[in-house]
Amino acid sequence: MLSLISMRADFKDIKAIVVDIDGTLTDMKRLISLEAVQEMRRMPIPVILSSGNVVCFVRAAAKLLGASDLMIGENGGVVQAGFDAKPFVLADIEQCRRARDVLLKEFPGLEPLDETYRKSELAFRRNIDVGRARQVVAESYPELEIVDTKFALHLKHRNVNKATGMLKLAAVMGIGPENFAAMGDSANDLHMLKAAGIGIAVGNAGPEVKAAADYVTKASYGEGAAEGFAWLRRQL
């Protein structure tokens, strides 16, 4: 059964939809759903990609998939408005680097991902004890956190997330958070779904993400995203 709860915003107020990539448009092998892309291109409002990945990846994905030239990278830490625009960096990566050095003493095998391209946070392979890593970071840098997206571990500032990235874009666009719909699957999508006027969770989303959504799709991963796009398009 589809899960549908009372809406927080009128559909007529929705001006754009912010969509996670990994686990929402893709499966766990990061294979994109062509059905989701097809439905995304039918949307009458801008589709803004939001990811924990670096913004250059998001930019390339947006161009290839036909999404908006507005984008959110690094879990909201980097926002770009225009394919050739200078990105906004919303967090200081230096503190993350210092915390990374502390983690390396506990986990010598800590393996960074895309570190050269990251501007606001750091990401690592999921090959360490996440609980212990969170404890180490909390003891040394309580203003930071580790988020597990099931694709990577992200060491980031607690007060920066996909919702703060969405708020930055809202300011650029001259609208409010209530004018966005948002769709995702993972813990790093939770703030975004809560802040948006309409939240959509795909069927593979965790219980907390589903609880925050106004609509939960029957299908999972990209097929769920296609379903979510089609559902929202019917309401607009």
Image: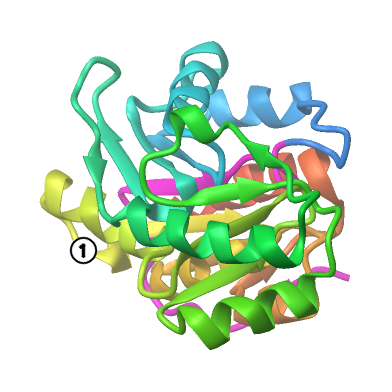
Residue bearing mark 1: 176
Query: 10 Å neighbourhood of mark 1: few (<14), some, or many (≥20)?
Result: some
Q: Is residue 13 visible?
A: no
Q: Which residues are magenta?
A: 1-25
Q: Is residue 143 visible?
A: yes
Front residue of this view, candidates 139 and 229 = 139
Task: State the SS at label 1.
Answer: loop
Q: Main secondary structure of the magenta part?
A: loop
Front residue of this view, candidates 53 and 175 = 53
Front residue of this view, candidates 192 and 113 = 113
Asked whether 16 falls inside the magenta stretch, the response is: yes
Quarter of the image holding residue 166? bottom left
Quarter of the image holding residue 65? top right
Residue 164 image offset from top left, x and y in percent? 32, 63
In the image, residue 102 above or below residue 224: below
Q: How many marks?
A: 1
Q: Residue at x 63, y 40 (%)?
A: 21
Which amino acid is tagged 1?
Gly
Q: Residue at x 26, y 60 (%)?
A: 167
Asked whether 226 falls inside the magenta stretch, the response is: no
